[in-house]
Amino acid sequence: MESISKLTERLFQIHRGERAYIHRGIRALELNIYQARTLHYIGAHPGTMQKKLASYLGKSEATVTNILKVLQARDLIDRQVASGNERQKELRLTAAGEQKVAEVHAVFATLETDMNAQLDDTERAELMRLLAKVAAAEPQMGQN
């Protein structure tokens, strides 16, 4: 049992370190995690509606409205009236928003590079195989 708790503790520590790294990188871009995720989603889904974004973020539409207002005030997104429905707005990145998304992606790319540098190709393949095995068991965890 002790080896299991050591495994879960190690996974938790890695996860916590990864999250701290990402939060520092995103904070340096003068964003919070929800703003970064919003920009990423809009960039991947130009013209998306607020309701779909709220579902992706797992936040209420009112909360998403506040996030969007901040991003729009910073000229990172544009909200345009949808054709045929003036109550809905299509969300798009501005040029500054596209640049900010590229900077956010660079934070993740640097993290990936740093993590990959710790392992050779064989170790990385084995780790990915083992993580896939653990991930496949995830739905059954805790159902004893």
Image: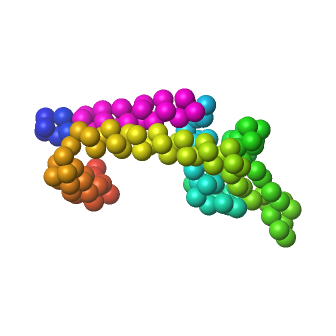
- Which residue is at 23% across, 39% downward? 118
Residue 21 painted magenta: yes
Pinpoint residue 119: horizontal percent, then vertical percent.
Answer: 21, 43
In the rendered view of the protein, which quadrant contains the N terminus?
Answer: top left
Q: Above or below — where is 48 with respect to 33? A: below
Pinpoint residue 14: horizontal percent, then vertical percent.
Answer: 30, 36
- Which residue is at 24% across, 35% downward? 10
Q: From where the camera sits, is residue 3 visible?
A: yes
Q: What residue range appears in magenta?
A: 8-29
Pinpoint residue 97: horizontal percent, then vertical percent.
Answer: 66, 46
Residue nearest the observer in this picture, 135 or 18: 18
Q: Looking at the image, which residue sits at the far bottom?
A: 84
Q: Above or below — where is 118 with respect to 86? A: above
Residue 53 painted magenta: no
Residue nearest the observer in this picture, 3 or 74: 74
**In-image side of 53 versus 129 (left or right):** right
Q: Say which quarter of the image contains residue 74.
A: top right
Pinpoint residue 51: horizontal percent, then vertical percent.
Answer: 68, 57
Q: From where the camera sits, is residue 55 visible?
A: no
**In-image side of 135 versus 86 (left or right):** left
**In-image side of 84 versus 22 (left or right):** right
Q: Say which quarter of the image contains residue 117.
A: top left
Residue nearest the observer in this picture, 10 or 125: 125
